[in-house]
Image (tube, rainbow, N blue to C red):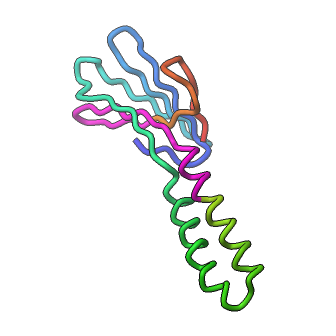
Amino acid sequence: MLVPAKGTILVKFTGDTLVGTTKTGLEKRETWIRIQNIDSVETLEAPIYALLGFGGFLAFSALGAFRNSSALGLILLVAGVALIVYAITNKRRYLAIYSHRNAIVVFMNKCDFTPCVTKF
């Protein structure tokens, strides 16, 4: 199950069923999975790879910019290192629930196993 930007996922247990509700702009999608049919559940933490890559690109381009202007090179180097540090320290956490036919991925915002709604 992929959720476009600006969407909301709510996952809750109702009896012996896991109910996943996905809301985006004009759509609402609900998925019911029996608990017996869940194959595995995992929580993952990963850095924001887009920022990590862009920070690395800025840091390496700063080395070339030092030839022409030391001020521009210093600015690019500081911006690149700041993006790398931000990407590593602010990791994305998500919960992945796999069944035979569905995979529900819920991105979490600093909530630990308490009912929470995740917004993008």
Query: Where residue 29 appears, x then y in whole percent?
Result: 47, 34
Residue 44's place in the image compared with 68, above or below, is: above
Quarter the N terminus occupies: top left
Front one among 80 and 23: 80
Q: Is residue 52 left or right of residue 68?
A: left
- Percent x, y for residue 86? 61, 51
Q: Residue at x 62, y 43 (%)?
A: 25
Q: Position of residue 76 (x, y in %)?
A: 68, 73
The answer to which image quadrant residue 20 occupies is: top left
- Residue in view at x 71 percent, y 74 percent: 74
Q: Is residue 68 above or below residue 78?
A: below
Q: Is residue 104 magenta?
A: yes
The span shown in magenta is 84-105
The residue sitting at 56% across, 67% down in the picture is 54
Image quadrant where one finds the C terminus: top right
Q: As rendered, which of 110 and 30 lies closer to the eye?
A: 110
Name of the residue lying farthest toward the top: 15
Q: Nearer the viewer, residue 66 or 88?
A: 66
Q: Residue at x 49, y 57 (%)?
A: 49
Above or below for 78 versus 114: below
* Figure disc tally: 0
Q: Is residue 92 magenta?
A: yes
**Residue 69 position by quadrant:** bottom right
Question: What x and y, as percent, mark residue 119?
Answer: 60, 36
Q: Nearer the viewer, residue 2 or 74?
A: 74
Left/right placement of residue 63 relative to residue 32 reads: right
Residue found at the very far bottom of the displayed protein: 68
